Amino acid sequence: MIKKTLYFGNPAYLSLRNEQLIIKLPEIEKNDSLPDHFKKVSEASFPIEDLGVVMLDHKQITLTHGLIEKLLANNVALLTCDSTRMPVGMMLPLSKNTLQSERFASQINASDPLKKNLWQQTIKAKITNQARVLKKHRTCNIRNMLYWAGEVKSGDADNHEARSAAYYWKEAFPMIDNFTRGRDCDPPNNLLNYGYAVLRAVIARSLVGSGLLPTLGIHHHNRYNAYCLADDIMEPYRPFVDDLVFSIVKSGENYSELTTSVKAKLLAIPTIDVMIEKRRSPLMVAAGQTAASLNLCFEGKLRRIKYPELL
């Protein structure tokens, strides 16, 4: 089942009742002149089991501890935004799999050759999907990228990821003078940053659901990064965010700011259709398959990570 993504951008009281997330509006709750039955019907609710991602984007949102506990128990990724309305933090459960300690051990004891092989697969899938994005939206040559994808060696020793990225971003937005991809650079980097944050939450949630430790990466190693593995595994998924951003830019919609309309499109990332194992699937479901296959690779039961392809 596809899990829902909920976004809260206005003041709200969020609580738990009968396994449901209950939404109350402060202006109604504080208005003593309104009858209780009106306050009751003005509530909205969502079954906790239907949720996958909850994003909090306002300083006047209140959550009860009981709700937080239930969200984490159901492996819901809880995102919070900063004063610029960009995702800045994420909360995930510490334990979501009955075999977690066993799977942690397999992940921790993974050999360097295995991790280099997994990174090779990851970068090959990423470059291939980037090439598909350019083929879909641009008229530039992609034969070089497909060649680089085929030439990726164990651990990407020749750094084909960087070579392909330089070409990819050069061709990404030819209508924008001197476009540079960077977290703090000009739009549409704001859209890319926001989309990648949503994607990161989806991938981290899937890894935790498969009993893996999102901190321990196969390639990324940063003492300050709690989600190194999520950053590794999301690489082949990034082009799906790019594809969506390309479409938003092409539509002519104002993307200089993260408007409600733009956010709505980016928050739909978990439901994007992808092709995985020759079957069409929502991105969030595919992420679960990717995480499960990665665990099997760590356990020595599988040699290939299942990554999606761009439709």
Image (spheres, helix red, strand yellow):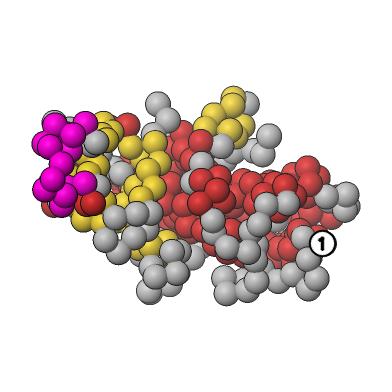
The vertical placement of 280 against 243, above or below, is above
- Asked whether residue 36 is drawn in magenta, I would say yes
The residue at which mark 1 appears reads as 175
Q: Is residue 134 visible?
A: yes
Q: Can residue 167 be seen in this view?
A: no
Counting from the top left corner in percent of width and height, residue 140 is at 87, 53
Q: Does residue 44 appear left or right of residue 114 in this picture?
A: left
The vertical placement of 249 against 52, above or below, is below
Q: Does residue 111 appear left or right of residue 164 in this picture?
A: left
Q: Which residue is drawn at 68% across and 34% down?
A: 311
At label 1, the amino acid type is: Met
Give, as a single range, the part of the protein colored magenta.
Answer: 28-41
Counting from the top left corner in percent of width and height, residue 246 is at 70, 51
Camera-side residue of 77 and 236:
77
Q: How many marks?
A: 1
Mark 1 residue element = loop
Camera-side residue of 247 and 146:
247
Quadrant containing the N terminus in the rendered view: top left
Q: Which residue is drawn at 22% across and 52% down?
A: 26
Q: Residue at x 54, y 29 (%)?
A: 281
Q: Residue at x 26, y 57 (%)?
A: 61
Camera-side residue of 48 and 94:
48
- Asked whether residue 116 is drawn in magenta, I would say no
Q: How crowded is mark 1: few (under 14 residues within 10 Å), some or many (20 or more)?
A: few
Counting from the top left corner in percent of width and height, residue 288 is at 43, 37
